[in-house]
């Protein structure tokens, strides 16, 4: 599982680049909510492609292992988000929890579900079925 933990690390700069791209381009022309939604969709596409690449290079082996990898990646993402946001950036809990409000149109929880499922979907439909 260590190799899959390490495989999560490139998702941090991938997410940062996605945020920078949002701020420098379409984020200037959309409402904050719509920019968040589009950025989340772009992030889902990027992590889907990344999950496919990881599955090709480090096959997940089984649906159970792939789901475990996805759940671990989602948990690491949440821990990073809250740890960095709270400890480094000093954001209040209300700001950190804001993106989790589906009722307000915030779709971050859907991204986390996607991140959890992506390796399993790659394993099932996109290759990555060999034993690692």
Image (cartoon, grey):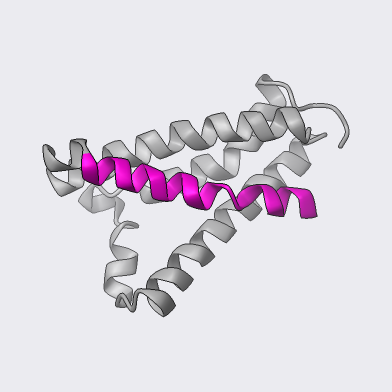
User: Residue 22 colored magenta?
Assistant: yes
Q: Assess whether residue 125 is covered by the magenta stretch.
A: no
Residue at point 43% right, 79% down?
Answer: 87
Can residue 82 be seen at all in this image of the molecule? yes
In the drawing, does residue 113 fall left or right of residue 51?
left
Q: Which residue is drawn at 68% across and 43% down?
A: 67
Q: Nearer the viewer, residue 35 or 9?
A: 9
Whether residue 68 sits left or right of residue 41 in the image: it is: right
Which secondary structure dominates the residues rendered in magenta?
Answer: helix
Residue 4 picture location, percent across and down: 72, 48
Q: Which of 129 and 16 is in front in this view?
A: 16
Image quarter of residue 110: top left
Residue at x-position 33% and y-position 66%: 97
* Res 107 seen here: no
In this picture, residue 29 sits left or right of residue 13 = left
Front residue of 60 and 24: 24
| 27 versus 85 height, above or below | above
Residue 96: quarter of image: bottom left
- Kindly give the residue lying farthest to the right in the view shown: 131
Q: Nearer the viewer, residue 16 or 60?
A: 16
> In the displayed structure, would residue 118 be above or below residue 105?
above
Number of marks present in the image shown = 0
Does 132 sit left or right of 93 as displayed?
right
The quadrant of the image that shows the C terminus is top right
Residue at horizontal 34 percent and vertical 57 percent from the top: 100
Q: Position of residue 99 (x, y in %)?
A: 31, 57
The x and y percentages for residue 20 are 31, 47
Where residue 89 sits: x, y (%)? 35, 74
Magenta stretch bounds: 1-24
């Amino acid at each position: 599982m260590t190799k899959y933990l390490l495989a999560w690390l490139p998702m941090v700069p991938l997410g940062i680049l996605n945020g920078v791209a949002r701020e420098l381009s379409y984020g200037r022309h959309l409402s904050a909510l719509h920019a968040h939604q589009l950025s989340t969709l772009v992030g889902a596409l990027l992590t889907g492609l990344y999950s496919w690449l990881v599955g090709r290079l480090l096959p997940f082996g089984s649906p159970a292992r792939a789901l475990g990898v996805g759940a671990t990646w989602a948990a690491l993402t949440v821990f990073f988000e809250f740890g960095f946001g709270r400890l480094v950036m000093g954001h209040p809990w209300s700001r950190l929890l804001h993106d989790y409000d589906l009722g307000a149109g915030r779709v971050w929880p859907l991204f986390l579900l996607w991140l959890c499922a992506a390796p399993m979907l790659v394993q099932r439909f996109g290759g990555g079925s060999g034993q690692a």
